[in-house]
Image: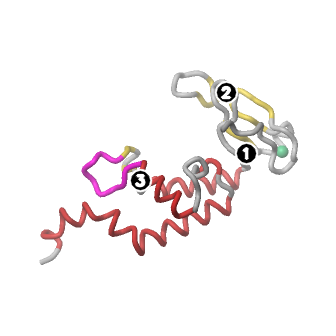
Amino acid sequence: MPLPIPECIHCKIPLVLRTSKQYRYHNGDPKRFYGCPNWPGCNCTSGANPDGTPSSIPADDATKQARRNAHRIFDKLWMRDGREWDGKSYLLTRKRAYEVMQGLMGMSEEQAHIGQFSIDQCDQLIERLKHWQEVAGMNTTFQKYKGKRKRGIRK
Ligand SMILES: [Zn+2]
């Protein structure tokens, strides 16, 4: 389902489609995004696809920071050194990591994207991920690792 035309979370007016001078898509085209008409007084922005359709939920700087924090912790489940699970390490696959997030947040596959989270939801995810790793997750996450290392670790 396409996302609605984004509205500024502070000014409650529609954001305007703009083209970035700084950022580019993978194909080299300048990035498009939605920005508040009251910029620079208001820094609320939202992502856009190359065709101009919205790609994220509007956010101010505080929300963007919270999402970066949440992503950093979540990505540790399935990435190492910026790369996806290689089938050898103890990390989860990206698909499995997202399933874990869906379970922890009680969200559907469509809802469970950090780029759409509020600050509260980011905090919730971080807290629940930490708890999950402490209680149940470690066994799942480190199963492969433990299996390999068991003899080496125990003296
Ligand atoms: Zn605004």
Q: The magenta stretch spans which residues?
A: 85-94
Q: If the image is split into quadrants, where does the C terminus sit? A: bottom left
Residue 21 — which label? 2
Q: Please indicate whether residue 6 sits to the left or right of residue 2 in the image.
A: right
Kind of residue at disc 2: Lys
Looking at the rendered structure, the secondary structure element under dot 1 is: loop
Q: Is residue 74 above or below residue 37?
A: below
Looking at the rendered structure, the secondary structure element under dot 2 is: strand
Label pair 2/1, CB-CB below 8 angstroms: no
How many residues crowd around disc 2 within 10 Å: few (fewer than 14), some, or many (20 or more)? Answer: few
Residue 58 — which label? 1
Looking at the rendered structure, the secondary structure element under dot 3 is: helix
Q: Please indicate whether residue 37 sits to the left or right of residue 31 in the image.
A: right
Q: Please indicate whether residue 103 sits to the left or right of residue 42 in the image.
A: left
Residue occupying the point 17% across, 72% down = 153
Label pair 1/3, CB-CB below 8 angstroms: no
Residue 154 image position (x, y, % from top left): 15, 76
**Gap in Å between the C-alphas at discs 3 and 2?**
36 Å
Residue occupying the point 64% across, 30% down = 49
How many residues crowd around disc 1 within 10 Å: few (fewer than 14), some, or many (20 or more)? Answer: many
Q: Please, what is the dominant secondary structure of the magenta stretch?
A: loop
Label pair 3/2, CB-CB below 8 angstroms: no
Q: Nearer the viewer, residue 80 or 51?
A: 51
Q: Is residue 154 above or below residue 52?
A: below
Q: Please indicate whether residue 150 sits to the left or right of residue 46 in the image.
A: left
Q: Which residue is mark 3?
A: 96
Residue occupying the point 34% across, 55% down = 91
